[in-house]
Every structure is written in structure tokens, then in C-alpha cells.
Amino acid sequence: MGSESLFRRYEPRYIVATDLHHIVAKDTIKHTTLDIEIKDIDNEVAFYGWTGNEINKGSADESVADRRAADKMKDLYDEIERENIDSFKADPVGFRHNQKAYF
């Protein structure tokens, strides 16, 4: 696990494989492995770094920029919804699922 080209390209924190009864997970940063039955996963929360606040949060500038970008995307979606209010009222779920955005 971990030597495939997709792993090298995207550098994921965790690599997980399961057969829906058993789970094997590898932490690529701490180089630890979890090999348990899925029903016991709640006993192994310490394996995942985000539960112990071990993940580096990044710089404050990045998080501010991320929040601003998210706010702008929310505003853009609200504007699209406002401009297409008739379609939205006719089928709100379908309207949300049929949105296409190109970046």
C-alpha cells in the first residue's frame, strides 16, 4: 500500500482499504498502520491525527484567504439562485444538483 503512482502524485495523509468488515489504514506521515475490524474503529480514534489536533493548521494567511474564497463562492451561488428564482421554486433539490460551475 502506498507505492502506486496516485499515492506519489497526491500524497494523501491516510491510505485506507476495506472489505466492509475489516479495515487497514496507513498513516503516511507518522508511518503507523491500523489493522482492525470496522466494528472496533471507535476504539482506535487516536490513530487519526485530526482527532488529537496533530495536523499543522497552516499559516493564518492561508485560512483567511480560504474563508474569503468560501464567502465569495457562497455569494456567487446566492446570486445564481436569486437570478433563477423561478427554477429554484419549482424544484429546489434539482436546481441545486444541476448547477454547473467552471473554474
Image: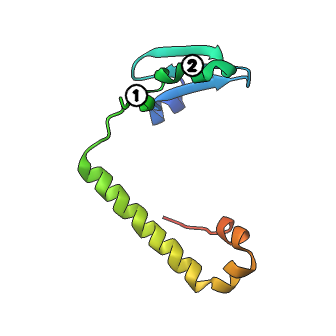
Q: Is residue 2 visible?
A: no
Q: In this figure, which residue is indicated by the disc labeled 2?
A: 43
Q: Identify residue type, mark 2.
A: Asn
Q: Quadrant of residue 11?
A: top left
Residue 27 shown left or right of residue 100 in the figure: left
- Which quadrant does the N terminus fall into? top right
Q: Look at the picture and state if 95 lies above or below 59.
A: below
Q: Position of residue 84 (x, y in %)?
A: 62, 83
**Residue flagged by tag 1: what amino acid is it?**
Gly
Mark 2 crowdedness (10 Å alpha carbons): few <14, some 14-19, many ≥20 = few
The residue drawn where x is 59% and y is 25% is: 16
- The answer, for residue 49, to whether it is visible in the render is yes
**Mark 2 or mark 1: which comes first in sequence?**
2
Q: Which residue position is annotated with label 1? A: 52
- Identify whether 4 is placed above or below 81: above
* Residue 72 horizontal/vertical position (percent): 41, 69
Rendered location of residue 49, percent (x, y) = 42, 27
In terms of depth relative to the viewer, which is nearer, 100 or 89?
89
Compute the Cα span from label 2 to label 1. 14 Å
Q: Is residue 37 left or right of residue 13?
A: right
Q: What kind of element bears circle 1?
A: helix
Residue sitting at x 69%, y 21%: 39
- SS class, disc 2: helix
Check disc 1: other Cα within 10 Å, few if <14, some if 14-19, many if 20+.
few
